[in-house]
Image (cartoon, helix red, strand yellow):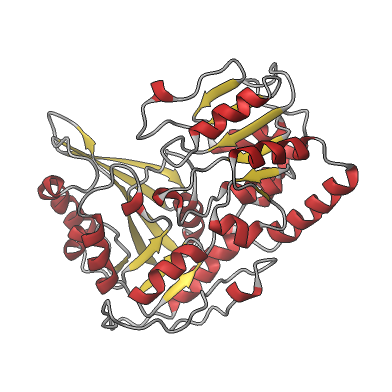
Amino acid sequence: MSVIIAMSHLRWNFVYQRPQHLLSRLAKHYDIIFFEEPVFHRKEHLMVVTKPHPKVTVYTPRTPVKADGFHDDQLPYLKPLVRELAANHENPIAPMAIPLLDELDPKFVVYDCMDELAAFKNSPKQLLQRENALFKRADIVFTGGPSLFRAKRGRHPNVHCFPSSVDVAHFARALDRTDTHPLQSKLPRPRLGYYGVIDERLDLGLIAKLADAHPEWQIILVGPVAKIDAAKLPRRKNIHYLGQRRYEELPQILAGWDACLLPFALNESTRFISPTKTLEYMAAQLPIVSTPIVDVAELYGSAVSIASTHEEFILACERALRETAKEQAERIKAAGNIVSSVSWENTAEKMHDLLSTLNPVRAETSESSSPPSDQPRITHSGNIPSRYRASTRSS
């Protein structure tokens, strides 16, 4: 049994998304160590250890340094902790915080690139430099969607595209429309909702216009506010902020909605996103309206309404709320064809298969190396366009 040591910029108890889904399932094959960013602690230098899932151990360093993330100032405190982990676990796989890599001497280095983090607000200045170094050390790279694949495929010879997946059984609980969350159960209908992190990626102007265009609609936003001033969020009588909810609560949240929203702004931070919630909305069989996010349109355009302007978005929401029985059946069928072919279990197994074939001798890479193919390796196809379908062979 090998060990995966994952250095993560996301906390396990934050919004439950790709890292938690994949690592909790890879725990079938590996012992998982989830090493979080440090938390400021004035008096002591210590590590808090929790076990949120079988064979998953979360390590949260406490350091007297206020710098965010895996900042250089944190390294003198983090390196001894990482060395201790390495001493207790032979042949670990996959750190992501590159300055700590040498403390581990890992058997393999795996980079799961789920976002273009350098484009996010307040991203560390060293991020691009560290990613360049990580590409030179990585044995294999996974990307969270075709947009990221196109951006990364020229930087490494062994890049595989693994779009987000879904736990269909979990979100099918939302099909019981009577089991709605008590926080929204007394709100009038119709209810249009979004859940996820509320940050610079959301088009707040669009949300305000949506609420103003139809004061009778209830706009529900579920999730933590990050990197933006909460005081600048649009405030209307029909906009409701429910805060962060647990993953277990999301089906109840969806059960009480009439339409789902992907109201993303079009900016550098959303250029490569592939929202996991899209498939979760589909599993709940609710209509979805999205701004023209590339991966959403390419992978799920047959089941999602795409609107390019604020006015088009409002019109698409109006159509979603008055769809006929025939239109509803066609939409549910298109969404069902997509979600029936994807699962986190399948994605984790395909990743495990690729990890099992890695050669311990690390391949030399360079920024000038040409990509092996124009096609991303996507391991679950379903209704994904044929140009993005490929085998799971490693390069």
State the residue in front, 144 or 178. Answer: 144
Query: Which percent across, then down, holds residue 140?
Result: 38, 73
338 horizontally vs 375: left or right: right
Query: Which percent across, then down, holds residue 52?
Result: 44, 42
- Position of 89 relative to 231 (above/below): below
Image quarter in which the C terminus is found: bottom left
- Kindly identify the residue that appears in the image at 61 percent across and 57 percent down: 297
- Position of 56 relative to 364 (above/below): above
- Kindly identify the residue that appears in the image at 17 percent across and 35 percent down: 66
- Position of 166 relative to 251 (above/below): below
Q: Quadrant of residue 184?
A: top right
Query: Which percent across, then down, holds residue 103?
Result: 17, 62
Image quarter in which the N terminus is found: bottom left
Query: Which percent across, then down, holds residue 292?
Result: 58, 51
Whether residue 233 can be seen here: yes
135 horizontally vs 176: left or right: left
36 horizontally vs 318: left or right: left
State the residue in front, 83 or 340. Answer: 340
State the residue in front, 146 or 251. Answer: 146
- Position of 74 relative to 352 (above/below): above
